[in-house]
Each structure stands twice: as structure tokens, then as C-alpha cells.
Amino acid sequence: MDLRPVYGDILRLRYTDGQLSAGERRLISATLRGRVSGRQVYLVPREREELVVGASVREDGRASAHVGSVAELLADAIALLPAVRDMQLHEVTARARPGTPDDRPYLGLLSPAVVVSTGYSRHGILLAPLAARLTAGMLNGTLTETDRAHLEAMSPGRHR
């Protein structure tokens, strides 16, 4: 299987004194997704009065955070939620997510007892319900024709 690293920078921000009213724990109560200047950005409220901002997409091979990507994430987050400007930048991380040559994940049986599920790049959280349903269908024999078509498109052997 052919996989490549697709890097993304992620920011953790913390609220500063006075940003939240008494009893408030966050400025937003659900994930906020948007597109700014053609780039995707998301803001996720977390516990401990944090906000997670992500995620850039880079294929530059650099495992460390990229200053330009961090600057774009901050600018895009401020465009979506102006209060971000007054928050504390608590943490910057970069992580690699596995991507396939055609950007479709690998999902299928390698043997009767081994299922492979990888290569989701930045879409893992979005495709997790489909991957779980298809995996369960493979293991318990309840695949539909549509399921089989999805699995054929995601076959781990398609790039051989």
C-alpha cells in the first residue's frame, strides 16, 4: 500500500480574563467550520476553556509547525470568530495524517482475519461512520451492493 504524509498544523487557544461572562465556559458551543480565501478552517470548543483551530494541509515533508500555515489559521479563525484575536495562543502542533496516491482511503480485508483501514488524510473523522459500517458489514456478512461498490473503490490492492 502506498501512503504519504499529509501534514496539518493545529492550534490550541485559551480564553483570556474577561472574554467569558460569569458561568460561561466557551464562546461557541459546537464546531464552527468555514472557508476563508479558499482555505478550510474549523474551530472546536474544548474543555478547560480552550478552542482548537485547525487544520492546515501541507505536503512539504516538514514534521514541525509551519509559520505561514499558523499565520493563515489565526487570520482565518479571526475572520470567523473575531474574539479569537484576544485569546492566548497556548499550543501549536503539527501532525502527519496518512494519504493515498488518489486521496481515497484504503479499506478492505487483507486476509480473513485482518482488515486494513487507513489513508483518510484529513477526512478521517468525517468518514469514520462509513468505515465502521463497512468494516462491520465485512466481518458479519451484511454488505449491500452499495457497500461493495464503496469497498471496491477503496480496495487496498487498487494501486498494484
Image (cartoon, grey):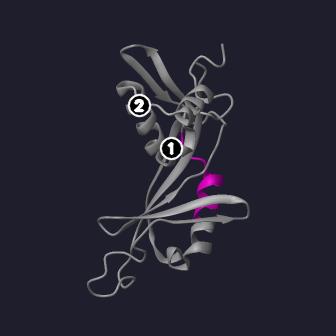
Quadrant in the picture for the N terminus: top right
Left or right, 105 with reference to 28: right
- Asked whether 118 or 95 is in front, the reply is 118
Q: Give the extent of the magenta segment.
A: 64-74
> Which comes before the other along the chain, label 1 or label 2?
1
Q: Quadrant of residue 39?
A: bottom right
Q: Is residue 160 above or below residue 20?
A: above
Give the residue type that dot 1 points to. Answer: Leu
Looking at the rendered structure, the number of numbered marks drawn on it comes to 2
Which of the two marks, 1 or 2, is nearer to us in this view? 2
Give neighbour class at mark 2: few <14, some 14-19, many 20+ (Cα, 10 Å). Answer: few
- Asked whether 62 or 98 is in front, the reply is 98
Give the residue type that dot 2 points to. Answer: Thr
Report the residue that reaches farthest toward the left.
Answer: 23
Query: Disc 1 vs disc 2: Cβ atoms closer than 8 Å?
Result: no
Q: Position of residue 153 (x, y in %)?
A: 62, 29
Provide the residue designation for mark 2. 142
Q: Is residue 154 above or below residue 59?
A: above
Provide the residue designation for mark 1. 127
Q: Is residue 69 visible?
A: yes
Report the residue that reaches farthest toward the right.
Answer: 37
